[in-house]
Image (cartoon, grey):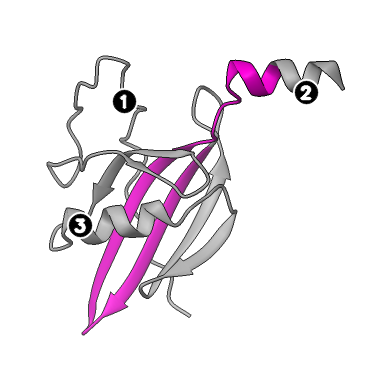
Amino acid sequence: MILVFVGVACLAPASASGGSQASASGRICKDVRTANGGMARTIVPTKGLSCRTARRVAARTMGRRLYTHKGFRCEGEKVAGAADRLYGCGRVRDGKAYGVGFFYYKPRASASEAGASAEL
């Protein structure tokens, strides 16, 4: 199995103001919400990969350490700071390597859920 290294070391979590940072590929895709309510942010695809595909791959995360989607093999590492995991995903198609890097943030408990769990 071939694992593609994604240059995510240059990534920094997006600021609260939503400003974009420079990246190796020169672009950062829009954030995407996952099915469990979490958020994939600072999504950076490699050159030749569309934001649409990168966002679809990131949307399938849901906090899992290892998963595959659309031919991408993704691994998450715990990181210090605000983000819960830093993901690197890669695939090889037609002899070309493609990758996606992004930060995943777990869904936060709302005030009503926090109050209900405190009563138990």
Tags 1 and 3 touching, CB below 8 Å:
no
Residue 77 location in percent, x, y? Answer: 56, 45
Give me the C-alpha separation between circle 3 and circle 2: 37 Å
Dot 1 alpha-carbon crowd within 10 angstroms: few under 14, some 14 to 19, many 20 or more:
some
Q: In this view, does 7 lie above or below 17?
A: below
Q: Which of marks 3 and 2 is nearer the N terminus?
A: 3
Residue type (three-letter) at the residue carrying disc 2: Ser
Q: In this view, does 42 lie to the left or right of 50?
A: right
Q: Helix, strand or loop at disc 3?
A: helix
Q: Residue furthest bottom?
A: 94
Q: How many labels does the image show?
A: 3
Q: Nearer the viewer, residue 49 or 92?
A: 49
The magenta region covers 85-114
* Rendered location of residue 87, percent (x, y): 45, 48
| Residue 5 visible | no
Real-space Cα separation, disc 1 to disc 3, in angstroms: 19 Å
Q: Name the residue under label 2.
A: 117
- The kind of residue tagged 3 is Arg
Q: Residue at x 47, y 69 (%)?
A: 68
Residue hosting label 1: 14
Q: Which of marks 1 and 3 is nearer the N terminus?
A: 1
| Dominant SS in magenta | strand
Dot 1 amino acid type: Ala
Which residue is label 3 attached to? 52
Disc on the earlier residue, 2 or 1: 1
